[in-house]
Image (cartoon, rainbow, N blue to C red):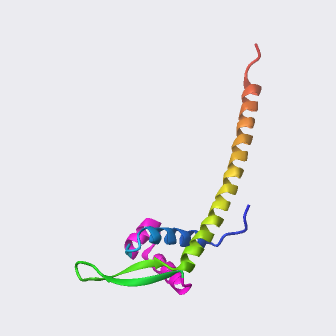
Amino acid sequence: MSENVPLHEDTHLKVLRLLEAKPKINQRDLAAALGVSLGKTNFCLKALLDKGLLKMQNFQSSKRKLAYAYLLTPAGIAEKTSLTGRFLKRKMEEYELLKAEIASLQQETSRKETEVQPRP
């Protein structure tokens, strides 16, 4: 299997993918989409901003409330691509291991079924 993956890598990938699709999403909706707390979402956004992977752009909504759009920087797009590649590699390895385990269990089950059947 792959090297141990930092837990935040998958979260960062999810955040970057969501923000690329919906740059004007607010933190509360982003947290709900990620299934994490608002505090964790804020922490993750700050980390991505500090790394230069995101930038925030102010915009005025029709109700005159201040809001932000989160835009991926060129470095953010490159990091998203890199994270996606590593994620895909891990999932393919997991898939191959599961396929082998399923085949082994199917063989074991069919052997047990033939052993248990009464002889005529």
Residue 39 against residue 86 in the figure, above or below = below
Which one is in front, 75 or 90?
Answer: 75
Which one is in front, 45 or 19?
Answer: 19
Q: Position of residue 75 (x, y in %)?
A: 57, 79
Q: Per the image, is 49 magenta? A: yes
Q: Position of residue 43 (x, y in %)?
A: 49, 81
- Within the image, what quadrant is residue 7 found in? bottom right
From the viewer's perspective, is 40 left or right of 59?
right
- Within the image, what quadrant is residue 78 found in? bottom right
* Main SS class of the magenta portion in the image: helix
Q: Position of residue 3 (x, y in %)?
A: 73, 68
Residue 120 against residue 101 in the figure, above or below = above
**Residue occupying image coordinates x 74% and y 19%:** 118
Residue 3 against residue 72 in the figure, above or below = above
Q: Which residues are magenta?
A: 27-52
Is residue 35 shown to the viewer in this render? no
Q: Per the image, is 37 magenta? A: yes
